Amino acid sequence: MKSSALICTSLILLTLLTGCSPDTTQIEQIRKYQELTVVTRNGPATYYEGPFGPTGLEYELARQFADYLGVRLAIITRSEPAEMYRLLAEGKADIAAAGLAITTAEKKFLRFGPGYLDVTPQLVYRPQSGNRKPEKVADIIGMKMLVAADSPHIKTLQNLRNRHPELIWQESSEHSTEELMQQVWSQTIDYTVAGATEIKFKQHFYPGLAVAFALDKSSQVGWALYKGTDHTLLNAVQAFFARIERDGSLKTLINRYFERARPLDYVDTQTFMRDMNNRLPDYLEDFKKSARKYALDWRLLAAVSYQESHWNPQAVSPTGVRGLMMLTNDTAELIGIENRRDPAQSIYGGAKYLRYMIDKIPARIMEPDRTWMALAAYNVGYGHLEDARKIAQGRGGDPDKWIDVKNSLPLLSQEKWYSRTRHGYARGNEPVAYVSNIRSYLDLLVWHDESTTPPDASPPAL
């Protein structure tokens, strides 16, 4: 296999480099040149261009680690683990952070930081009417299973075949694990194999995708480092992860990427995908034009519009709000919109009002929390948002973190709490659901936009 050959090359390089010790330690070199170089892969769970700039779990962790060291972050992208290992061996990358499984085989020539994410290999399938859920390897004998050629789970399948000689699968060098999960969802193939967290992430985009059973014992993701005699960078990585686990920020970050307050169900997703193909093209240029004018991501603006009107310019609510962005009369007057049912005017007005709300949020609040709070204010009103932030602070939470504010917003419907606030009662559950839905639509738009990018395109340099 191509990946096996690359791993062998990496092993040779590592052997040749063993024993070469610089005058300064690795961590001293990083601080001397003020740069940490991290190799990762482009993907929704690792590193990609999101609505607020570069994002992804691995990117966020790497950025925080660079800040921890007091240096800038440089990102390199590669598609296959073996290519990442080669860069480590050649000294062109300090860390490989790409959702890499910590395995016994890789430990022979790499060092790993602490495990922080479950990548237990699981069999992915889609339940169909009349089909029984596979519960063991014997249940999938003779079925069509396709696995990515660079998947770390190939070794697991090879070990299983020692006990089940009739187990067969095909390896694809043309499809990623993500693409194969989509094929399972579309019922093009019966099964594939993926890690537990990766499946959980994709179930958000492919409702109905399910796990049959685990193929092996639990395993974890960790950062990979060159296995030399210098442990200074590894020690720093271990100290960093110990700190973010202790203060809860690791859990918060993982939840941001893998947890959803209300995942879209199958019907939600199907309806959205249909509307994205049939309705969105009519307004796409207006979204992009207005987003550019007000320094917004057009996908965020489109997600807000979908939550408001399902991209129906004739939408009218029982309370009289109208158009693609469902503007009230007062809001339209405030931002200078004459015809709320005109798509271009509505989108322009919605962009202007959203920018107005974002700019009202205290500048110290960082993204994406800043935008989530602005969306809540767009829905429930800025005064009620401020009340919820004060409640969050009074309950020992952080008023500058969305995760704490969203837990306090529902309290605005309880007299015990709203009687103490300046702006009184509000249906506080609604902005929480509102923001959650927009985040779901935004995820789908970003995912669709990223998936249509040419395969050889690289993210912009940082």
Image (cartoon, rainbow, N blue to C red):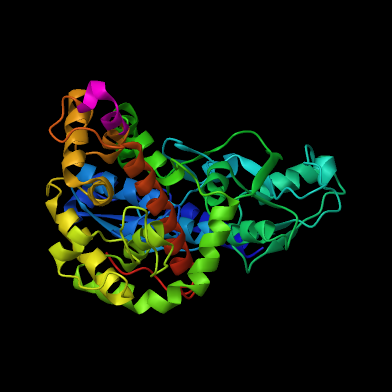
- Residue 179: image x %, image y %? 60, 62
What residue is drawn where x is 26% and y is 31%?
Answer: 412
What residue is drawn where x is 52% and y is 41%?
Answer: 102
Q: What stretch is highlighted in magenta?
A: 410-418
Name the quadrant of the N terminus: bottom right
68 relative to 9, above or below: above
In the figure, is residue 175 to the left or right of 311? right
Name the quadrant of the C terminus: bottom left
Does the magenta-highlighted stretch encompass residue 116? no
Q: Which residue lies furthest to the top in this view?
A: 416
Q: Which of 118 and 86 is in front in this view?
A: 118
In the figure, is residue 186 to the left or right of 367? right
Q: Which of 134 and 266 is in front in this view?
A: 266
Look at the magenta stretch and give its main secondary structure: helix
What residue is drawn where x is 31% and y is 57%?
Answer: 320
In the figure, is residue 258 to the left or right of 360? right
- Residue 333: image x %, image y %? 15, 64
What residue is drawn where x is 43% and y is 40%?
Answer: 261
Q: Which of 234 and 229 is in front in this view?
A: 234
Q: Can residue 24 be seen in this view?
A: no
76 relative to 200, above or below: below
- Residue 151: image x %, image y %? 61, 54
